[in-house]
Image: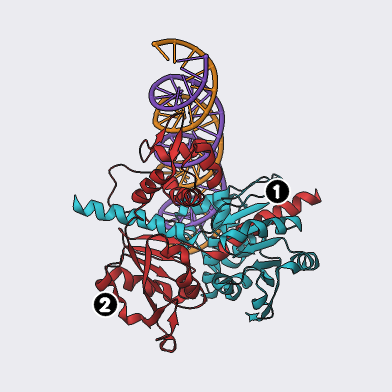
Chain colours: A red, B cyan, C purple, D orange
Amino acid sequence: MTARTSTESARDIPEATVARLPVYLRALTALSEAGTGTCSSEALAAAAGVNSAKLRKDLSYLGSYGTRGVGYDVDYLRYQIAREIGVTQDWPVVIVGIGNLGHALANYSGFRSRGFRTVALLDADPARHGEMVAGIEVQPFSDLESIVAEHGVAIGVIATPAVAAQAVADRMVACGITSILNFAAGVLSVPAGVDVRKVDLSVELQVLAYHEQRKAQGELA
Amino acid sequence: MTARTSTESARDIPEATVARLPVYLRALTALSEAGTGTCSSEALAAAAGVNSAKLRKDLSYLGSYGTRGVGYDVDYLRYQIAREIGVTQDWPVVIVGIGNLGHALANYSGFRSRGFRTVALLDADPARHGEMVAGIEVQPFSDLESIVAEHGVAIGVIATPAVAAQAVADRMVACGITSILNFAAGVLSVPAGVDVRKVDLSVELQVLAYHEQRKAQGELA
DNA sequence: AGGAGTTTGTGAACGGGAGAACAAAACGGA
DNA sequence: TCCGTTTTGTTCTCCCGTTCACAAACTCCT
């Protein structure tokens, strides 16, 4: 999924753990908002939907932030995870391709509330330029370079049709973006040092269909 | 991610392989449309963005559909994978929560072109009822039961705000849906036998942020 | 017909993640 | 202070997935 070829880390956290840290962060935020001050690994694991042993092992990669016999301080742990992931700082993001999905992404509150700030919406279609989406004006794709340079953007989101995705990725890489979240179908090829994560909606449905088909076959037997 | 508790399969395909089959399917479709009649595992692996050894092993779980010294017949292999996944048949789907994301999903062509047919768009907000989205009328959420029964729906998509997701899932399960694709934040709890797959957009960005932060730290040293 | 060249399918080694189980540490009550 | 209770952090084992490497099988050319 991710093309890890960048500088190796000093204290490296397993990929599987990294993918779960945001889930723990969300669960801790919910607990904090509910007024919970302290929680056990068991309670947090339930809120995050994982095994408590796995949760403890994951957290142990970050350090020893719990207290034996007591549990974890919700706000303290939340801060430590946020710092580890890097969402205590502000990440400027550009979204390219303002179709239906781009609209949804621009309006998605889950980005802004977690340290991601959409600094620009870009689209190749001139008919879309000037349109206001989520309080941001849609600009020409050709403005990419100046916007990335101005805001120091490191993360780009591709929500274009599949045919345009590779070209967009190439332009992004050329102007210094090193992390890409790709919603377009197909495989992106990027140089080493650039991370790509892919979200494919139809793949998820097809996996469900496979299991669904199996269930139906089982009933026949 | 997936709550596999249903009937165990006769010839079981590893989860990791199941998740890649749709990717191969897409690559094969692209090759077919490009007029390619035959392709090697090396070529198909490149198109799908995976290792060729992994591709061959994945395909070997389905059977021996290739010819040594030659490769795979594109259309034949495509059909075999489609049949194995279950996308040769028609899967009726309901989408609940027609906000920005629900709009995008309803308009997403990748569903329809792969055997998934959106039979209803449901929303709890009366102000949305009657609105036409992607040629389908938005109906009240309370119509869920009758629609599921009428069309034999087995797969539901949840695109509601997080607070409503669990209630929606409960209703879906109660009326017979056994596979759920969840875009809402938070953990869904469902009974055994129901599969849930979760897509969390902000998790993906946070994983990118983590790696991005690591890259930045590496440059300092 | 036979040999050289290709490409699949799979056996085996390897690495990483999941879960069980337990020791270490903190708290609370007597 | 001492003992029982709770809960973390970690070790150990098992299993799944990835990758390598190679034999089997097929084509093509002479």
Name which quarter of the figure residue B150 lies in: bottom right
Q: Looking at the image, can residue B84 be seen?
A: no
Q: Amino acid at mark 2?
A: Ser
On the picture, is A67 further left or further right than B21?
left
Disc 1 element:
loop
Name which quarter of the figure residue A123 lies in: bottom left
Residue B206 position within the rendered picture, expressed as x and y whole percent measured from the top left: 40, 56
**Residue drawn at (50%, 37%), measured in percent from left and top?**
A40
Residue A114 position within the rendered picture, expressed as x and y whole percent measured from the top left: 41, 59
Density class for disc 1 (Cα within 10 Å; few <14, some 14-19, many ≥20) is: some
Residue A30 position within the rendered picture, expressed as x and y whole percent measured from the top left: 50, 51
Q: What is the count of numbered marks?
A: 2
Residue B82 position within the rendered picture, expressed as x and y whole percent measured from the top left: 63, 62
Q: Looking at the image, can residue B21 be seen?
A: yes
- Report, in whole angstroms, how far the alpha carbon at label 1 lies from the one at label 2: 52 Å
The circle drawn on residue A51 is: none
Task: Name the residue tied to disc 1.
Answer: B193
**Residue drawn at (51%, 42%), measured in percent from left and top?**
A44
Task: Name the residue tied to disc 2.
Answer: A146
Q: Residue furthest left?
A: B221
Disc 2 element:
helix
Q: Looking at the image, is B124 positioned above or below residue B42?
A: below
Q: Residue furthest bottom?
A: A127
Query: Looking at the rendering, in which quadrant would you find the N terminus of chain A?
Result: bottom left
Q: Looking at the image, is A40 positioned above or below residue A207?
A: above
On the picture, is D24 further left or further right than A192?
right
Assess whether mark 2 and mark 1 are in contact (beta carbons under 8 angstroms): no
